[in-house]
Image (tube, rainbow, N blue to C red):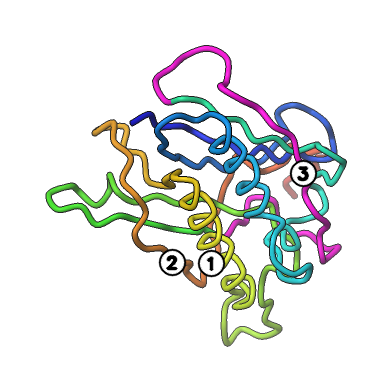
Amino acid sequence: MPIYRVDAVLPYITNIPRDVTVNTFHVEADSMTGDQLNAVHGAIPGFYNNTQASSRVAARINGYVSREANACQTIIRQVGVPGAPLDVDTWTLTSSAYNDCLPFEVALACSYYSLQPGVPRGRSRGRIYIGPLNYGAGTITLHSGAPPTPASSFMEELGTAAAELHGALGSYDVTWGVYSRVDEVLYPIEHGYIDNEFDTQRRRQVDATDRQLWTPA
C-alpha cells in the first residue's frame, strides 16, 4: 500500500521562504485520490484549528506565524516517488490567544508509537514538535521551587487534537503512522503521549539582528 508524506507548512510573517515551521505526518492509503485527498486536506488544518476557540492548538502558536488567508500549506508526496508533490492545498491558521512569544526554538512534542513484535522501538515511534509557542503554552513559575512546564490545558488540547486527527483520517481509510526508513514500512499508531517538558527545535531560531561588543578590562 502506498505511503505518503504530508507536510504542514506554517510560514512566518516575514514572508521569507526559509522562515517556516514544518510538521511532517506519514499516512498510508490505497489510492490518495478524491475523498481521501479531501480527508487529508481537511484533517491536517483541523489538527491545528478545530475544537473551541480557546482550546485550539493554533491558539498556543505565537503571532509571528502568519495568520494571513491561505498562507499555510498542506503538501502531499508519495514516499519514494521523486518530482513534484502529488497535491498541494492552502489553508488559514486561526488566531493566537496570547501576544507574548516564547523563544522560537521552544516546542511541545506530541509523541506516538506502535508496538510491533521483533521491531526495534526506535523504528516504530515518532513525534511532531508544536511551535513556535506563545506565553500561554507554559506555566511560568515566579520562584526557584519548580521549573517552567507546559500548561496542562495545552497538553490536553494537543492530545485531543492528535486523537481527532487519527480518527478523522481513519474514517476515510487513511492510516496515520510511523514511517520507518530502514524497514520502508508504515507502522500504524497505537498509542500516544505528551510529556510535561518542553523540547528544543533549533532550526526554528531566527537569525540575530544585533551584536553587543565588549572589551576586556
Tell me where the magenta segment starts and ends, as one range.
79-108
Instruction: Please state if 33 lies on the left or on the right of 16 as rendered.
Output: left
Q: Main secondary structure of the magenta part?
A: loop
Residue located 45% across and 32% down the image: 4
Distance from disc 3 to disc 2, alpha carbons, whole Å, reads: 49 Å
Q: Secondary structure at mark 1?
A: helix
x and y percent of residue 209 in the render?
82, 38
Q: Amino acid at mark 1?
A: Gly
> In the drawing, what numbered circle is on residue 193?
2
Q: Label 1 crowding class (10 Å Cα cut-off): few <14, some 14-19, many 20+?
A: some
Give the residue pinned by disc 1: 159
Q: Amino acid at mark 3?
A: Thr
Residue 169 sits above or below residue 110 on the image: above
Distance from disc 1 to disc 2, alpha carbons, whole Å, reads: 7 Å
> In the drawing, what numbered circle is on residue 130?
none
Residue located 44% across and 58% down the image: 111
Q: Amino acid at mark 2?
A: Tyr
Q: Earlier in the sequence, mark 1 or mark 2?
A: 1
x and y percent of residue 20 in the render?
70, 36
Distance from disc 1 to disc 3, alpha carbons, whole Å, reads: 50 Å
x and y percent of residue 61 in the render?
73, 56
Check whether the beta carbons of the residues at disc 1 and disc 3 lie within 8 A of each other.
no
Residue 189: quarter of image: bottom left
Between 120 and 26, which is closer to the camera in this rendering?
26
